[in-house]
Amino acid sequence: MIINSRFFNRSELMGFIALAVVLFVILPLTLDVFRLNLVAKYLTYAFVAIGLVLCWGYGGILSLGQGVFFGLGGYCMAMFLKLEASSVENTKIQSTPGIPDFMDWNQITALPFFWQPFHSLTFTILAIILVPGLFALIIGTAMFKRRVGGTYFAIITQAVAAILTILIVGQQGYTGGINGMTDLRTLKGWDIRPDHAKIILYFVEVVLLFACIGIAQFIRLTKLGRILVAMREQEDRVRFSGYSVANFKIFAFCMAAVFAAIGGAMFALNVGFMSPSFVGIVPSIEMVIYTAVGGRMSIFGAIWGAILVNFAKTSLSESFPQLWLFGLGALFIAVVLAFPNGLSGLWADYVQPRIDRLFASRKAKAGWNGNSVADSAPAE
Amino acid sequence: MLVGHQPKDFLLAVSGLTVSFDGFKAVNDLSFYVEENEIRVIIGPNGAGKTTVLDLICGKTKATSGSIQFRGKELTKMKENEIVQTGVGRKFQTPSVFEDLTVFENLEISFPRGRTVFGSLTFQRDQLVKDRVEEVAEMIFLKDRLNTYADELSHGQKQWLEIGMLLIQDPDLLMLDEPVAGMSVSERAKTAELLNRIIKNRSVLVIEHDMKFVEDIAHKVTVLHQGQILSEGTMEKVKNDPKVVEVYLGH
C-alpha cells in the first residue's frame, strides 16, 4: 500500500490514483468522442488551476489575469497551426497566398516579422513556455520589487488582461481580432480534427497534466513550498529571516503563468481555435473561481474544481444561458462564505475522516485475528 | 558629533539618525554605539521611538538621514534580507511565527542556508539541519513539540519559537522588541533564563518595559524620549537621573 509515501501522503496518493483512473480509464471508456473532447477542454483549465494553487493558495498572490498567460500560450500554439493551415496551396484564392486568411482580409501583404519563427515547431514549443514566463517575470519584477501586493496586484493583473484583449481585438490584421484564429487543421501534417486525433490529443493532454501535477507537487514539498506558505502568513518574518520575498513571489507567479500557458496551448490543439474571449477579465476571474471551488490549497481539488465547474457551465448554459453567470457568482460567494477551502476542504472535513475510520477499523480487525502485518508496515 | 573618530571595535554605530514621517521626527539625530557582546536595553515612554529605532536598523523603515554602521557596513543602503545576511536578527513585538507550519519547519526556514529561490528548491533536510533544529528546540523548551503546528502553541511558546528562529540564524546582533510582554510569571522567568543563555557571544539590543527584567540583563541602558536620547549609562546611573525619573520612571 505504501508506494512513494514521501512524495504523496495517503490521501494525496488516493487523490492521485482516483484522478488517474478517472482520466485514463473511466472517461475514455464511457464518453463518446464529442464529450471526451469537452473534457479535454475542461482540463486545459486544470493547468491554470494547478498554477493558481501554487501562486494563490500557497503563496497568497491572487492573480486575476491568468487568462493572459493562458491566451499567450494558446496564441503561440495557434500561430504555428495557423501558419501550417495557410500554406500557399490552401490559400491560393487569396490576393496574397501563403499568409493567414485574416491577414489577407486586412490588406496585409507579407507575413509580419514576429510570425516568421512560428514556422518552427521547436520555436513554438519554447515560445509557449518562454513568452508567458518572461511576461510574468516582467510584471512580477515590476510589481513585487516595489512591494505591490494583495488587492493592488490583483487589480493590475486584471487590467493587464483587459489591455491584452483590447490589443488582440484591435490588431485584427496580426491577431485575427475578435474572431481569433480559427480553422486550425494540422500539426506537422497530422490532422488534428478527426475523432482518432482528438482521442490521442486527449491522452497527450492528460499525460502533460500529470507531469504538471508532479512538478507542482515537487515544488510544494521543497523548502520553497514551505516558504510560500510562510510568506502568505508573515511576509515580514520571511524577509527578516534573510529571504528576498519578491524573488519568491516572482517565481510562484512565473510558474503559474507557465502552467496556464501549457493549458492554453492544449486548448488550441484540442478545441481547434483560439480567441480573445479566453484572455480577458471574465475568463480570468472564472479561472480563479474554478480553483476556489475545487480548493485553492489542494492541487487535486483545484483540478476537480476546473472539471466540475466547466461541466456545470456546459450543461447549464445549454439550457439556461442567462442564468449561468449568476450561478457562477453565487457559487463563488458560497465558496468564500461557507467553505473557504472548497470541495477539497469539504472532502478533508467530512469524507476523509470516514475513510480513515474505515481503514482503522479494518486494521483493528486484522490485528484481533492475530495478523499484525498492517501495524508492522515500515514507518519510513 | 563623534562621526570623526569611530573606533573600530564598535559592532553597531548609529550616528545622526533621523527619520521623519510627514514632518514628525520619530527619531531625531540619534547617536549611540553598541560594543561586541554588549547587552543594551532601550527604555522610554510610549511613542519615544524605540521600535522605530529597531525598524531603522533592520531596514523595515528607511532613514531620512544619518548612518547605521554594522561592522563597518552601511545598513541604511541595504535591503532587509541583506541586513539579515550580514548578521542582524530581529524579533517583533507581537509573535510572528508561521502558524500553518510546524515548529520544526518554522525553525528550518530560519536555518541560514538555501536562501535563494534555487537554493530553497534544492535544500536538503540533512543531519546538520536536524541536529541544529533539535538543539535550538531544546533551548526554547519546545523539543517535544517539533511536529506541532505553530498555531497550537500558547502566546509564550510562540514568543520562544520566534526567539528560536533568530537563534538558528546565529546573528551577531540580536534585536528583541519586548520579549516578555504578555507572558505569565513562570514564562517570564523561563524567558529570562533563555535570554541569559542566548546572549552569550553576541550583542543584544532589547526594548523592554519590565524594569526588573531590565536590571537583570542590561549592561547599559539607553533612555529614549521623543526620538532623542534622554540618558545613557548603567541602570544605576539612569535610575538616579532626575530627567529620567521625571518623564519615565516617576509614574
Image (spheres, coloured by chain):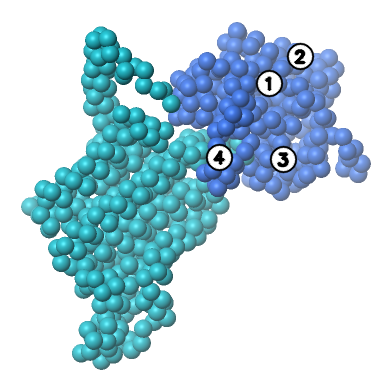
Q: CA distance from mark 1 to mark 3?
A: 25 Å
- Mark 1: few/some/many CA within 10 Å (<14, 14-19, 20+): many
Compared to residue A17, the image places residue B238 above or below, namely above
Residue drawn at (64%, 11%), measured in percent from left and top? B190
Give the residue type that dot 1 points to: Glu
Q: Give the distance between the C-alpha atoms of the residues marked 2 and 4, in whole angstroms.
A: 42 Å
Q: Looking at numbered disc 3 in the image, what kind of residue is underneath it?
A: Thr
Considering the numbered disc 1 on the image, is that residue within a helix, a strand or a loop? loop
Residue at disc 2, secondary structure: helix
**Chain letter of disc 1 in the image:** B
Quadrant of residue B41 in the image? top right
Chain under label 2? B
Q: According to the rendering, which colour does chain A have?
A: cyan
Tag count: 4
Q: Note the chain letter of the blue one.
A: B
> Image quadrant of residue A156?
bottom left
Q: Is disc 2 surrounded by few (<14), some (14 to 19) or many (20+) residues within 10 Å?
A: some
Viewer-proximal residue, A124 or B5?
A124
Residue B89: image location, x then y, percent: 67, 33
**Is residue A378 placed above or below A36 in the rendered structure?**
above
Q: Quadrant of the N terminus of chain A?
A: top left
The chain letter for the residue carrying disc 4 is: B
Residue identified by numbered label 4: B123
Residue denoted by label 2:
B215
Task: Pinpoint residue A120: horizontal percent, then vertical percent.
Answer: 38, 74
Q: Earlier in the sequence, mark 4 or mark 3?
A: 3
Q: CA distance from mark 2 to mark 3?
A: 30 Å
Where disc 3 sits, the SS reads helix
Q: On the rendered structure, is A91 left or right of B97? A: left
